[in-house]
Amino acid sequence: MPIWVRSPRAGKEFYTGLCRSKLYEGAALGYFRSVSLREPGQTKGTRLFNLASVLSYIESCEAAGNQVTSEHSVGRSK
């Protein structure tokens, strides 16, 4: 398995099953690691997500008995 993955342009990411918006939201909320690769002065770059940290987050949701259900939010259900 790869160490870093890109978000899909459409559909679900192959290893995690998460869509692009869930990956970005989860990273923004600090649930898993991501990095943006861009040259100095550039406004756009390539965002990569650490696969192990995403899978670990998914496992922690399972262990807590929570599910990520909304297509628009990556949060822990209560």
Image: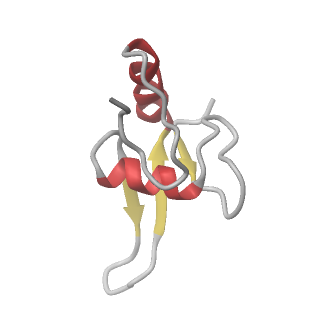
Judged left or right of residue 15, residue 67 is left
Instruction: Determine the residue positioned at 65% across, 57% down.
Output: 8
Position of residue 28 measured from the top left corner of the image (x, y, whole percent): 31, 55
The quadrant of the rendering that contains the C terminus is top left
Which of 48 and 76 lies nearest the eye of the viewer?
76
Q: How many marks?
A: 0
Judged left or right of residue 10, residue 47 is left
Which of 74 and 57 lies nearest the eye of the viewer?
74
Which of 53 and 4 lies nearest the eye of the viewer?
53
The quadrant of the rendering that contains the N terminus is top right
Position of residue 38 measured from the top left corner of the image (x, y, whole percent): 40, 72
Q: Which image quadrant for residue 31? A: top left
Instruction: Determine the residue positioned at 46% across, 61% down.
Output: 47
Looking at the picture, does residue 67 appear above or below residue 36? above
State the residue lying farthest toward the left.
30
Q: Which image quadrant for residue 56? A: top left
Position of residue 58 measured from the top left corner of the image (x, y, whole percent): 47, 27
Instruction: Determine the residue positioned at 67% across, 64% down.
Output: 9
- Colour scheme in use: secondary structure
Instruction: Determine the residue positioned at 43% across, 51% down.
Output: 73
Position of residue 17 measured from the top left corner of the image (x, y, whole percent): 64, 38
Looking at the picture, does residue 43 appear above or below residue 24? below
Looking at the picture, does residue 72 appear above or below residue 53? below
